[in-house]
Amino acid sequence: DTAVSQTPKYLVTQMGNDKSIKCEQNLGHDTMYWYKQDSKKFLKIMFSYNNKELIINETVPNRFSPKSPDKAHLNLHINSLELGDSAVYFCASSRDRVEQYFGPGTRLTVT
Amino acid sequence: KQEVTQIPAALSVPEGENLVLNCSFTDSAIYNLQWFRQDPGKGLTSLLLIQSSQREQTSGRLNASLDKSSGRSTLYIAASQPGDSATYLCAAPNSGNTPLVFGKGTRLSVIA
């Protein structure tokens, strides 16, 4: 059973398009996150949601909009994709500030 | 704001050797610290979580230590194997917040 799952695993799209990445966790966690890993492999937090409410929003362009329909899901929608958005996006979840579990990542390539 | 640094950036050792990976963090008001492993093109696998009240945590051949006062953590790998080859990431939360701040990782190669 996959604890944190993401779809799609790979996403290739052209500049200017709008795309979404989905994330689901079946661990019963109350906090979910989106991280971005750039071409230099550096991981950085983008958003954090606790019980469906946004609690952290790092300096991320407003073209990125997280959506949490329920506690088990945190989707990432990206408008007007740019070349610099190419990266690997990781979803994660945790409960009560304990161990974070990561999804397998979505490799986004913008051409 | 938390900053995490890992040294060395890359390490190559012969199989069977014991090794230590280093991690330092600037904000010692952390409630835990987590070590991850990432294989090329793959996601992150959690290796060890050390709570702020603990000084070390062990899992098999891995031992992680935490010294909050000095802002340091180490990951000790005993009797290294080629299968241990991967990038090892250290991560600590910002004070009062749960999102993790990651170091840039140590890329480990264990040569058979």
Image: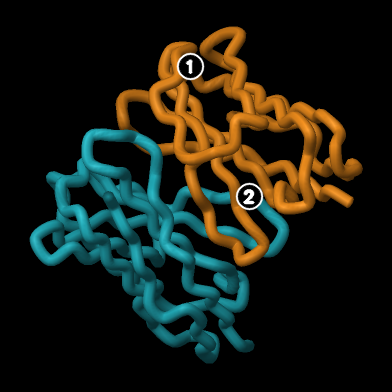
Chain colours: A orange, B cyan
The quarter holding residue A39 reads bottom right
- Amino acid beneath label 2: Gly
Residue A24 in view, yes or no:
no
Q: Same chain, marks 2 and 1?
A: no
In the picture, measured across the screen, residue A76 lies left or right of residue B108, that is right
**Which class describes the residues within 10 Å of circle 2: few (<14), some (14-19), or many (20+)?**
some
Q: Residue at x 9, y 60 (%)?
A: B69
Disc 2: which residue: B43
Residue A62: x, y in percent? 60, 30
Q: CA distance from mark 2 to mark 1?
A: 21 Å
Q: Residue at x 22, y 66 (%)?
A: B72
Q: Chain of mark 1?
A: A
Which is more toward the observer, A78 or A6? A78
Disc 1: which residue: A28
Up-down relation of residue B112 to residue A41 (above or below): below
Residue A2: x, y in percent? 65, 30
In the picture, measured across the screen, residue A55 lies left or right of residue B46, that is left
Q: Chain of mark 2?
A: B
The disc placed on residue B30 is none
Q: Residue at x 90, y 43 (%)?
A: A14
Up-down relation of residue B51 to residue B82 (above or below): above
Residue B26 in view, yes or no:
yes
Which is more toward the observer, A83 or B24? A83
Residue B53: x, y in percent? 13, 45
Quadrant for the N terminus of chain A, please. top right
Secondary element under disc 1, as helix, strand or loop, is: loop
- Amino acid beneath label 1: Gly
